DNA sequence: GACTATCTTACCCAAAAAGATAAAATGGAT
DNA sequence: ATCCATTTTATCTTTTTGGGTAAGATAGTC
């Protein structure tokens, strides 16, 4: 099952990749040859129809010359902002 | 084909997950139930024997209550540090 | 209109992720 | 040495990624 959050994460990351790629004047074909990832696969990732592996993301980030974290960092703003100290006592509910 | 850089990225990310998980006093079983990812799968990821999907990473990051980018940010230090302006003229070599 | 470049979609295929489960390590504590 | 919790490894099945290719869409230009 894939949650809304995850869909949003994929969506944003795809947009991010496309923005950077366009800003560098690269076509999908060119990025495909730079990364070794096929253009159709890149298209699926940019349009959030595919859930790429970490190394796939890393290859794209490398070709675009930015750290992987930059491709997904908006998620950082959306996530819970580490308020206070959570290092003790995560609430496991019925699970512990 | 999987490069040395990618292996290093996976290795570091696995270590990072394990560090955070331990610092929060969580076992693999507990994290498995929090994420919906099986404990064996988590073990493979932490020991860099598996190349997880982005949403898999996101679920782990969520459970550990930190942004995904924090799980892979060392790669940022290792990558080329965006010196100067690379937005024009990526070298495509024979590919253009 | 036709032509071109770019991107998307739809097939196949192989390889890999991920869940389930069970069986081995591993390590601590008594 | 024994017990126990935790982690690793192995096997199996299902699902998904990702390459290849070809076929559609979608501009934009002439």
Image (spheres, coloured by chain):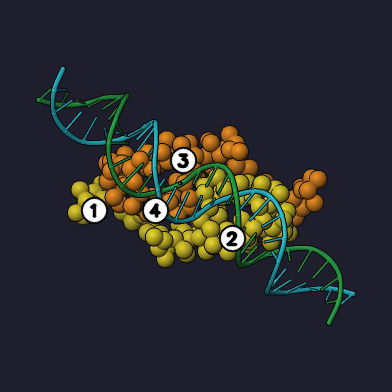
Chain colours: A orange, B yellow, C cyan, D green
Residue beneath the point at 58% across and 64% down: B47
The label nearer to you, 3 versus 1, is: 3
Helix, strand or loop at label 2? It is helix
Helix, strand or loop at label 1? It is loop
Reading the image, the residue beneath label 1 is B91
Reading the image, the residue beneath label 2 is B44
Callouts 2 and 4 on one subunit:
no
Counting residues from the N terminus, which is met first, the one under dot 1 or under dot 2?
Answer: 2
The label nearer to you, 3 versus 4, is: 3
Using the image, name the chain to which the residue with label 1 belongs.
B
The label nearer to you, 2 versus 4, is: 2
Reading the image, the residue beneath label 3 is A50
Residue beneath the point at 80% across and 51% down: A96
Residue B70 visible to an observer of this rendering: yes
Residue beneath the point at 30% across and 51% down: A34
Where residue A25 appears, as percent x and y from the top left, is 27, 41
Between the residue at mark 1 and the residue at mark 2, the CA separation in whole angstroms equals: 37 Å
Callouts 3 and 1 on one subunit:
no
Residue A67 visible to an observer of this rendering: no
Between the residue at mark 2 and the residue at mark 3, the CA separation in whole angstroms equals: 22 Å
Using the image, name the chain to which the residue with label 3 belongs.
A
Callouts 1 and 2 on one subunit:
yes
Examine the image and state in which quarter residue B28 appears: bottom right
Between the residue at mark 3 and the residue at mark 1, the CA separation in whole angstroms equals: 28 Å
Residue beneath the point at 31% across and 39% down: A22
């Amino acid at each position: 099952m894939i949650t809304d959050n995850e869909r949003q994460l994929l969506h944003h990351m795809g947009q991010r990749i496309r923005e950077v790629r366009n800003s560098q004047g690269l076509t999908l074909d060119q990025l495909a040859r730079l990364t070794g990832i096929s253009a159709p696969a890149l298209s699926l990732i940019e349009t959030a129809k595919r859930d790429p592996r970490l190394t796939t993301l890393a290859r794209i980030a490398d070709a675009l010359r930015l750290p992987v974290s930059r491709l997904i960092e908006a998620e950082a703003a959306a996530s819970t902002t580490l308020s206070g100290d959570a290092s003790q006592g995560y609430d496991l509910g019925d699970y512990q």
